[in-house]
Image (tube, helix red, strand yellow):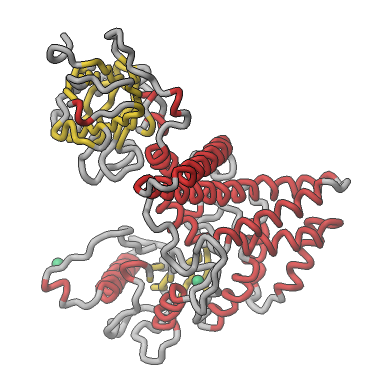
Amino acid sequence: MVWMLDGGKWCQCERCQALGSQTDRNLLFVYHYDQAIKRAQAEGRINRPVRLLFLAYADVLEPPTRPLPADFDYDTCIATYFPIVRCYVHNFDDPDCSKNAAYNKALLGWATDPGRYYKGQVCIGEYYNVSGYKCLPVCYMHTMANDIPYYYGLGVRHFHYMHCTTANWGNKALTNYQMARQLWDPRTDCSALWTDYLAGRYGPVQAEMRTFYGHLEKMLCNVSKLKYGLARRLDTGAANLFPTTHLKYGRTTFEKDDGPDLLEILAYAKQCRETLDAIAKQDLPERIAQRVAEDERLFTYGERTVQFYDALCRAYEAARQSVSDQSDKSDQSDKSDQSDRARAAFRQAEALADLLKADTTSTKLSSSHASAANGLVASYAQGALLRLQSLLGPMAPKEVKLLGANGTPLVLTGEECLGGGGVLHGYGFDVYPARKRVSEHGNYVYGQGTPADRLTGWFRLGDVPAGGLTLTLYGIKCPRPPGGEVAGEIRVNENLVFGARVPLTETGLTRWDLLVSAAALKPGLNRLEIRNTEPNGVTSNRPWFGIDRVELRETADGPAP
Ligand SMILES: [Zn+2]
Ligand SMILES: [Zn+2]
């Protein structure tokens, strides 16, 4: 394989530019590399045949724009065409899909265009389990039935896909079997193959399972938009969760670029579940029951994933509705309806998140980056839980701590605040590099833009103290590199109380006092927000800072001693 770096940058200097497009330059590199191997073979330093499969992908997807060296060896240098994150709603050659049409155009430029400069062999690298799919039980039976003969018709003679799982196949066994049979004979009658396969695998329930596969294929064919679009937007709390025509929330149809929408996807999932439930009532031979059980386990991972996305969508929608209704004071009951709906959807999302987190088998057994620790990490949307917590506020407003009148401070531990890295990695933190535990119930915030870039704490006041409040924070910082600074903000009810480098140390819990004026406070619920404002944050990485606890007291005669 002759592969450049994924996401690598090409030199912009004049001499390099003069060599042509990125693909032209890549092919020159392949050519010289191949020539060097041939010399080494002639000199007896390499004693085996070597074929170079080079990329037609990403930065070098477009076909070459100028002639190749006359002695470019098409027997040893083979283009591998990778249509990453292509659409599986549509066949590869469907002109009604702009994503695939763009990929198809580039492929024709490599494989068949009469004026093309590359005239050699083409290998297709399909993506039946591209890393972002994280081993979801996607079904490709009709896609493959169309696409593999289509590729063959373009002269393609090599084929593989990323990233095969090595066990726990469930319905993916059909993908792998069908692929082997179609590669052996591209004219394979897939309809007959399915009938034979389903009969052999499922015997008495082959008809039911055929229905199941049909619904499963429809349920997950929009997987690229689900995993690379919606999930990432839920994770970051994007304002528009459904910007493409391929995937909307409710059922919509478009002339082009249309796909199953989220509600349709859920309906297909329900039909799959109903089929499996009906099969479960039958008395089946042990080996058949086990095969259905394997399919069911993997299907459940897919079912929970789409249900999790749905609950998050509903929670965002209702939470935003309730926030925007706050300005419209005329309709108090609508507002509380919306926030009840948002909380109910959030609780459903939390319950599904727990189930996904407990599933540590479905997401394993592929190559490392196509696998994940559990179904929740694999969803790419766990950050949405933090965003929603922050949007929704306390789940039980009446249980929020009240500042007493007797001078006792109100204490909020980091764990009692919503959001933060504690949700992801557990509460409490250490100082580095000693790895000494300095907090058991603290929480911590990563750089700006990460789902865990802020903590939200809630407290209640009877009357607003005339002198305001004193906040005493205890925390540490973990800058990048060590010895540096971490920028942060403290806000009370959106009023900026602090915005600068946080005055914490790296070596142990540091006390930090802040005054909050009475004007920033209100009777009843008050919101305290602690943010990391270092730009371009990366979850689970420096720069972060941790807060063990915040003590709140009335400011009487200046800050507390
Ligand atoms: Zn250069
Ligand atoms: Zn499409």
Horizontal relation, residue 314 to residue 497: left or right:
right
Answer whether residue 437 is visible to the viewer in this image: no
Q: Residue at x 68, y 62 (%)?
A: 215
Q: Is residue 42 above or below residue 486?
A: below
Q: Is residue 411 left or right of residue 167?
A: left
Q: Position of residue 95 (x, y in %)?
A: 49, 81
As drawn, is 491 to the left or to the right of 460? Answer: left
Considering depth in this image, is 370 or 86 the residue closer to the camera?
A: 86
Q: Is residue 327 visible?
A: yes
Image quarter where the C terminus lies is: top left
Identified at 56% across, 80% down, the residue is 150
Residue 194 on image: x %, y %: 74, 67
Q: Is residue 43 above or below residue 118?
A: above
Specify the quadrant of the image occupied by residue 144.
bottom right
Q: Is residue 478 toward the left or the right of residue 419 in the image?
A: left
- Which of the two residues, 495 or 239, is positioned nearer the viewer here? 495
In x, y percent, where is residue 283? 88, 46
Look at the image and tell me in which quarter the N terminus lies: bottom left
Q: Position of residue 62 (x, y in %)?
A: 34, 76
Answer with the quarter of the image where residue 70 lies.
bottom left
Q: Residue at x 42, y 39 (%)?
A: 392
